[in-house]
Image: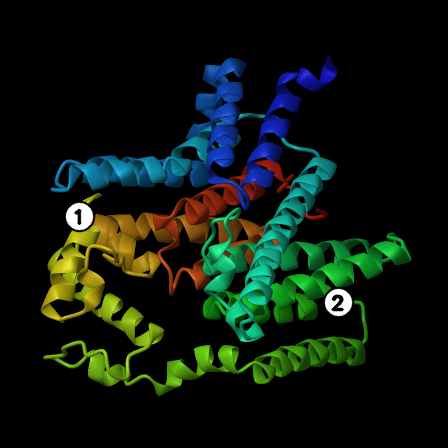
């Protein structure tokens, strides 16, 4: 019955959270509850409290959640506030569970968690892709409709393209991490399989058409190529990087749909949107210009609620008022867009204090990753921060669980004190 020991139970429930995250939100929530029950049944409360007292990253996460509770005191929309508290429970649960227990996962267990996530994301992405291909062939539509929207219409895997693209970007970092770390010791068959998986994962990310995950992933992988092959010759480094960049350029140039998604960025009249008396018009608008309207309204509301924000549940309500003034259709009941930027969203919601705690939840892990030379940890945090510039990732379960869970795994359960992992 050794598998049912306390330490093994924590590892098993961690694997359940990992494998269900890209696949099913319900199964993922059940897995998190099981992890919490294992933690409660363990006891050792004095030791756990002592561990948390000296754990800066855990304290930042917990303080951030407590601030959401305080924000309920001055929010008007209590029902929305309680929804936000429920969504952000991960900021409370994972630091408590993973940050207070003394037992670290072994290196092999940590690696197995990473491999499990890659497997689960590959399964989820393949399901989405096969469903999209089925719809294209069934409806006799052009292959270009596979991009972006159709991938998120799977009847099995319900995930917005931006989130699955971010997950797959992290998978690319994991694959590259294993190839760089164990290239000399793995078999030829494993090398070939890993390279094929790398190419598939990269191709799927491009197929989503999610701009910021694509840009972030490409930049971070180029840096990983540079830093991960120090023992190789300069010629080898240059060849690998050139090959990767060449493939990226060819893919973008090959597909008009993907070109268009990047082209609209420099075609947008940014100065017009930020002019004093701007009014939204449907003519000549695109996805990027709509984001700019959301950012402008967010900045205007932040200016009026700089220190404490509007409260835990009032962010969207205040944005809708601004959207109405700008004649932006994002105000309508079926939309009620958020800021589409994690930094603006949390400053708007919880003020300067909330923004500061959010930044500390990124900065402290970055310092830890750099100090202990944890490239994969740094790549994960950087990916999330960059993707958060165009999406309110902490507003959705798929974003906040991803960030809180892996942040805690890296910080508390990955043998972070050893520079060899």
> Where is 224 relative to 405, above or below?
below
- Measured along the vertical axis of the image, is residue 328 above or below residue 335? below
Q: Residue at x 69, y 69 (%)?
A: 225
Q: SS at mark 2? A: loop
Give the image location of residue 35, x and y in percent: 52, 26
Q: Which mark is residue 163?
A: none
Q: Position of residue 199 (x, y in %)?
A: 70, 66
Dot 2 corresponds to which residue?
A: 229
**Marks 1 and 2: which is nearer the front?**
1
Image point 63% across, 71% down: which residue? 222
Q: Measured along the vertical axis of the image, is residue 299 above or below residue 275?
A: above
Please report whichever mark, 1 or 2, sits nearer to the chain's N-terminal start.
2
Where residue 405 appears, as percent x and y from the top left, is: 50, 40
Residue drawn at x 38%, y 85% is 266
Residue 392, quarter of the rendered image: bottom left
| Disc marking residue 314 | 1
Q: Residue 285's image quarter? A: bottom left
Q: Residue furthest right?
A: 188
Mark 1–mark 2 Cα distance, whole angstroms, equals 49 Å
Name the foreground residue: 197 vs 393.
197
Instruction: Tell whether 126 sits left or right of 343.
Output: right
Q: What x and y, as percent, mark residue 277?
A: 10, 79
For the N terminus, which image quadrant? top right
Decide which of 186, 338 is in the foreground and name it. 338
On screen, residue 196 versus residue 254, left or right, reads: right
Taking the spot 62% from the left edge, 42% from the top edge, the residue there is 416
- Colouring scheme, one of rainbow, by chain, secondary structure, one colour: rainbow
Density class for disc 2 (Cα within 10 Å; few <14, some 14-19, many ≥20) is: some
Q: Quadrant of residue 386?
A: bottom left
The foreground one among 183 and 296 is 296
Q: Is residue 67 visible?
A: no
């Amino acid at each position: 019955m050794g598998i049912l020991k306390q330490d093994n139970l924590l590892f098993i429930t961690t694997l359940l959270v990992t494998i269900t995250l890209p696949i099913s939100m319900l199964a993922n929530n059940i897995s998190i509850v099981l992890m919490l029950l294992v933690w409660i049944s363990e006891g050792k409360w004095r030791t756990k409290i002592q561990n948390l007292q000296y754990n800066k990253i855990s304290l930042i996460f917990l303080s951030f959640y407590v601030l959401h509770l305080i924000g309920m005191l001055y929010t008007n929309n209590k029902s929305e506030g309680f929804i936000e508290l429920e969504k952000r429970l991960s900021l409370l649960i994972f630091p408590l569970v993973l940050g207070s227990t003394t037992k670290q996962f072994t290196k092999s267990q940590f690696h197995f968690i990473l491999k499990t996530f890659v497997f689960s994301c590959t399964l989820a992405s393949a399901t989405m892709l096969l469903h999209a291909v089925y719809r294209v062939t069934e409806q006799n539509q052009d292959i270009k409709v596979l991009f972006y929207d159709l991938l998120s219409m799977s009847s099995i895997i319900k995930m917005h393209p931006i989130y699955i693209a971010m997950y797959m970007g992290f998978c690319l970092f994991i694959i590259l991490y294993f190839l760089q770390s164990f290239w000399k010791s793995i078999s030829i068959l494993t090398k070939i399989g890993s390279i094929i998986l790398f190419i598939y994962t990269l191709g799927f990310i491009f197929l989503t058409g999610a701009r910021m995950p694509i840009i972030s992933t490409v930049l971070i992988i180029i840096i990983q190529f540079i830093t991960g092959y120090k023992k190789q010759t300069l010629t080898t480094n240059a060849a690998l990087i050139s090959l990767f960049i060449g493939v990226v350029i060819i893919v973008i140039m090959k597909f008009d749909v993907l070109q268009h998604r990047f082209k609209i960025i420099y075609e947008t009249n940014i100065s017009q949107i930020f002019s004093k008396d701007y009014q939204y018009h449907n003519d000549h608008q695109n996805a990027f210009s709509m984001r700019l309207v959301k950012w402008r309204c967010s900045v205007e509301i932040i200016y009026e609620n700089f220190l404490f924000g509007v409260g835990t549940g009032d962010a969207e309500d205040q944005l809708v008022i601004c959207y109405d003034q700008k004649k932006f259709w994002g105000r309508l009941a079926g939309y009620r867009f958020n800021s589409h930027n994690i930094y603006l969203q949390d400053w708007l919601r919880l003020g300067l204090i909330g923004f500061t705690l959010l930044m500390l939840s990124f900065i402290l892990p970055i310092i830890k990753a750099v100090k202990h030379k944890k490239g994969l940890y740094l790549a994960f945090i950087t990916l999330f921060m960059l993707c958060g510039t165009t999406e309110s990732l902490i507003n959705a379960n798929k974003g906040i669980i991803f960030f809180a869970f892996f942040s805690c795994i890296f910080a508390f359960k990955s043998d972070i004190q050893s520079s060899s992992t």
